[in-house]
Amino acid sequence: TELRQWAIGKGYVMWETKPGHGLEIVPEQESYKVGDTARYLVKNPYQGAKALVTVERFGSIKSWVTTLKSNMEIIEVPVEPDYVPGFFVSVTVMSPRVNKPIDKNQVDLGKPAFRMGYAKTAVKDPYKEILINVKTDKSVYKPSETVIVEFQAHPRHPTADREPIELAVTVLDESVFDLLSGGKDYFNPYKGFYTLDDLDLANFSLLMRLVGRQKFEKKGANAGGDGGSSLSMRSVFKFVSYWNPSLKTDSDGKAQVKFDLPDNLTGWRILVMAVTPEDLMGLGDYNFKVNQPIEIRPVLPNQLLTGDIFQAGFSVMNRTETAKNLQVVITATGQVIAPTANTSWMESMKNMVGLGKESVSKKYTIKAEPYKRYTQWLPLQATTAGLIEFEATAADGEDSDGLQKSLKIWPRQASVTAATYGTTVNDEVIENIKFPEDIFPNVGGLKVIASPTVIGGVDGAFSYMRDYPYYCWEQKLTKGTMASHYNNLQDYIADDLIWKDSYTLPGKTINLAKEYQAPDGGMAYFIAKDERVSPYLSAYTALSFNWLRTAEYDIPELVEKRLHSYLLKLLRKNVLPDYYSKGMAATVRATALAALAKHGKITRNDISRYHSHVERMDLFGKSMFLSAALQVPGTQRIRND
């Protein structure tokens, strides 16, 4: 154990000073409460010098100038409510220039000097905490009952000007709450916000420049936020029975909520976070239970495939102090049958052909001792892909419990699709089809689609783009362009395929183009910088602009002009990325040719220059090259090739 004490008095003390500008400050205590007076011993090297004292946190809270008459001075700082959860005390002591001769080494011993020191002080006082009382109308409930919760919130230290209090309330399953490493602290806004971060104030002194001293540093790091992640409601919905992010209290800080419980038999934790418009906050909690005399729990497989033979189990518990004779009934309805004895699996699969929804049920009688589990099993076989709905009940005439549970059946085989396509002007078309010999009789099918136009069957493409969730510039542009095509092809699209914003989306998409255009005029997927420009995306954008103009949408003149300049440079200089293969380069240039030819910016020489590249192009590139050639006079021979 080490105990240090300091005694001060009149007289001079020679402190051991280290090189640099540091000033040693010794705090009397490491932490205080509101209303205390914090005291600091300053080891002052400049007797009689002026000192700047500041109280800091997120900037300067308070400052004053004082004279340090001796080498051992006490600085006192009254701890105010706004100093919670802590503060930094800074003392800067300055020695002015004095008349001293310059020594033989040309050292100016009379130059101005200063020293600075910091002391970190915690204020461990829940002064600004809101206290919350929580109570329910009962301590134990049954499933699906209505819970009434009353709240009473008030500041730990009320003021004359009382602020309104707002609550955020969640009711969390205790089994989930127990998994949180932080426990209640995970939800406590007071502990999250009222923590003392690192110092965020930087200091600067002209003396550092005046005397040529260049060593200068920031006192501490930038303060960060709480960093806590919020609970995801969608993923844990079945474990949250109530959530209200904004519950206002009355003038007395009171509020009430009602909610219906789910069917879980568990404990529930009520967590209440309270805040005011200024800086008061707090957390309250309460727990209650949901229970009943008889409990059923499912004991089912995690997944099923068609043809699986399995046991569907349900566990029954008597939660009373006396034994009970229980009648248990388990029923399964859906794509399921009772297994057939002495039948091979393949034979049973064939017997399932044509089966629809079936129902299988079984009754049991058990003597259930107190707080013991009894699992009853129902043998089943899954028929086809679909859903099985289970119902299980247990009763003894006085008490009962019922449970519903569903289980999905997945296909055993991955589907393989084979298709053929053609056009005809004849009255009859014959297509030969051969089915595999070992095909499963209850899987697959045959579908024939006939359309009087080659545009038929495009519904899937439009619905896919309508619902497409990703958003780089290529995807935004494609979605906007497809919306324009959707409007123009209404006669060929099913009536039930609705694209609500199809008329406004193309215009909005065009207006976004400038946000993805780099300084050199090319287009980028996300960040509009020259080094991120994509030649393919730039050519595709110019092509899409042509389609949208045909649909009578206005294209921004400056954006298109800069884009065309980039594409002309692409055609006449080798500015493609190194990873582009010869085939990729040829196809991208063909797309640029097609886009620019529409505006009369491509000559016969341009078409001739890239004629020899056609063999490297893919089918899309060849179609683009032909499209460009068709728009340029004097290219008949190239078109024929």
Image: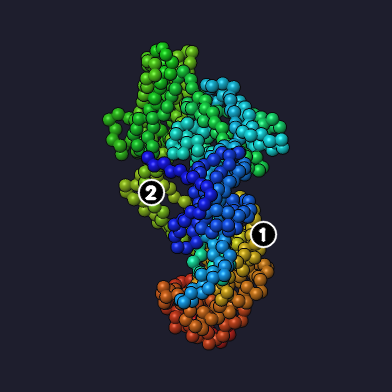
Query: For the residue marked with disc 1, what is the amino acid?
Result: Thr
Q: Position of residue 543 (x, y in %)?
A: 57, 71
Q: Residue at horizontal 58%, vertical 54%? A: 69
Looking at the image, residue 78 sits to the left or right of residue 434; the answer is right
Q: Position of residue 291 (x, y in %)?
A: 49, 22
Where 259 falls versus 35 (above or below)?
above
Query: For the residue marked with disc 2, what is the amino acid?
Result: Ala
Q: Foreground residue, 118 or 451?
A: 118
Q: Position of residue 135 (x, y in %)?
A: 58, 25
Q: Foreground residue, 329 or 279?
A: 279
Q: For marks 2 and 1, give the CA distance.
A: 40 Å
Q: Quadrant of residue 411?
A: top left
Mark 2 or 1: in front is 1
Q: Residue at horizontal 55%, vertical 53%? A: 70
Where 597 falls versus 486 (above or below)?
below
Colour scheme in the image? rainbow
At label 1, counting other C-alpha atoms closer than 10 Å, the crowd grade (few under 14, some 14-19, many 20 or more) is few
Looking at the image, residue 437 sits to the left or right of residue 616; the answer is left
Residue designated by label 1: 504
- Is tag 2's residue or tag 1's residue first in the polypeptide sequence? 2
Q: Quadrant of the N terminus?
A: top left
**Can I make out residue 169 in this image?**
no
Residue designated by label 2: 414
Q: Foreground residue, 217 or 244?
A: 217
Q: Residue at horizontal 41%, vertical 54%? A: 417
